[in-house]
Amino acid sequence: MSDTLNLTLKIWRQKSPSSTGKFESYKLNGVSTHMSFLEMMDVLNEKLIKENKEPVAFDHDCREGICGMCSMYINGRAHGPLKGTTTCQLHMRHFKDGETITIEPWRAKAFPVIKDLVVDRTAFENIMQAGGFVSVNTGSPADANSILIGKTIADEAMDGAACIGCGACVAACKNASAMLFVSAKVSQLALLPQGQVERTERVLKMVQTMDDAGFGNCSNTGACEAECPKEISVAHIARLNREYLMASIAGE
Amino acid sequence: MTSITKIFTPTVGRKVLMALTGLFLCMFLIEHLYGNLMMLYNDGGVAFNKYTEDMTHTLLIRIVEYGLFAGIIVHVVDATLITISNNKARPVKYAVNKQSENSSWFSRNMGLTGSVILFFLVVHLRTFFVAHRFLDAPETMYESVVIAFKDWWYCAFYIISVLFLGMHLNHGAQSAIHTLGMSNKAYAPLIKAGGMAFALLMTIGFAMFPILFFFNILK
């Protein structure tokens, strides 16, 4: 089996948020199967720079699957074909020699394209600012483990906290809904004693901010869970709905 | 309590409204199937006709009937509003999108299956409900059933529509429970299996009648 691939890359190119983009095709030969997808993109960009062409803009940061910056829609799948991985953790061995790979940015009204494959995910920041926090008293640091939390609750909260905010859930959802993201963040704090103070206010504000950003409605297709690189369960969405209903009925 | 007015306005609230009306319509389906089962007595429609007559003369049923039509209208209007906002949420579509890799066909096509059911409902109401309630059909309700299911195309249309109903319920029933927050990791597989069982039961329950009548097993 050969260790290199010859690929055709069909990439979305868009100069600015306001300009209309289009697909451009690039031939890239001798791609090592051991490369990550982003390293393959680096190779392409070096080639483009040498040819005096504009390199492809794409988001990336840690390249170890925890920062949530990389965000490509590869061959019709968020973060590519592999389950439970970010684009940076996707390796070229999962592609075939001679394959045409279509690479698009996340598509959602709430995630406008900044350039090429880079989208603006400020909407997620706004949702977090609306309620994704706990209030902590200042002063001398509190003792660690002064509040004991049961293992099952801690595990469930951690499942929600595993969200890296990459936006794959929105990208994969047929309605561009942000419910998995918001539910993971609401869950994580609603489950823990530290999150109780803002509990009712939080869910109402975060859902309101989500709506204002122009995300779609959840229709429980489960596409988000299937494409989430952290494999966050849609059970969090049920919890968000529960929290929301309780807050609406019993809230101040 | 100021926020109670806001329950049904944003995304979550709209979905809750879909779920509540959907489950209400599911309860109606059970009641409707219960009525249909009267025809299995094969007594020339005595039990079935008595049941339909009793239904029209019960005050509570007449009140619920208005609720039922309201439920259908709210379910359809809300679905339309949700679909419009969903389309707005993704103005530029993907060139390549492999949705079959991450979600079921049923879950992605509730609008299609729902539209077929709505069309069926109009025809179905015209054949039975409107004919008897408003147009004073000379035959009994049971005779209307016998006449309708003599036509092979009416039977085919009925069975295909019921199949679409089954597809709609397969996703809809469990989705509604999820939307109302009554699900977690432990119960989710049970709720999904229950939704599928309900969908199958309703499909078989309703679809058997055109077959039984067409082949003269019921007369």
Image (tube, coloured by chain):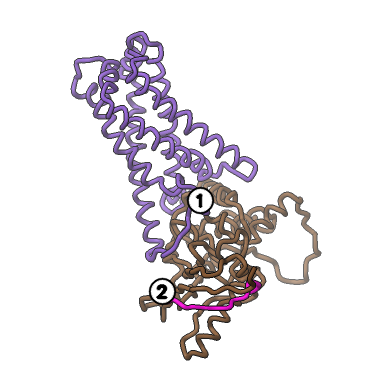
Chain colours: A brown, B purple
Residue B112 picture location, percent across and down: 36, 45
Using the image as rendered, state which of residue A16 and residue A137 is in the foreground: A16
Using the image as rendered, state which of residue A122 and residue A92 is in the foreground: A92
Same chain for mark 2 and mark 1? The answer is no
Name which quarter of the figure residue A112 lies in. Answer: bottom left
Magenta span includes B203: no
The residue at 57%/66% (across/down) is A95
Magenta: main secondary structure? strand
Residue A97 picture location, percent across and down: 55, 69
Label 1 residue SS: loop
Question: Which amino acid type is marked by label 2?
Answer: Phe
Indicate which disc residue B103 carries: 1
Q: Is residue B28 above or below residue A133?
A: above
Residue A187 picture location, percent across and down: 61, 54
Q: Are marks 2 and 1 in contact (CB under 8 Å)?
A: no
Indicate which disc residue B25 carries: none
Magenta span includes A33: yes
Residue A84 visible somewhere in the drawing: yes
For the record, the magenta segment spans: A23-35
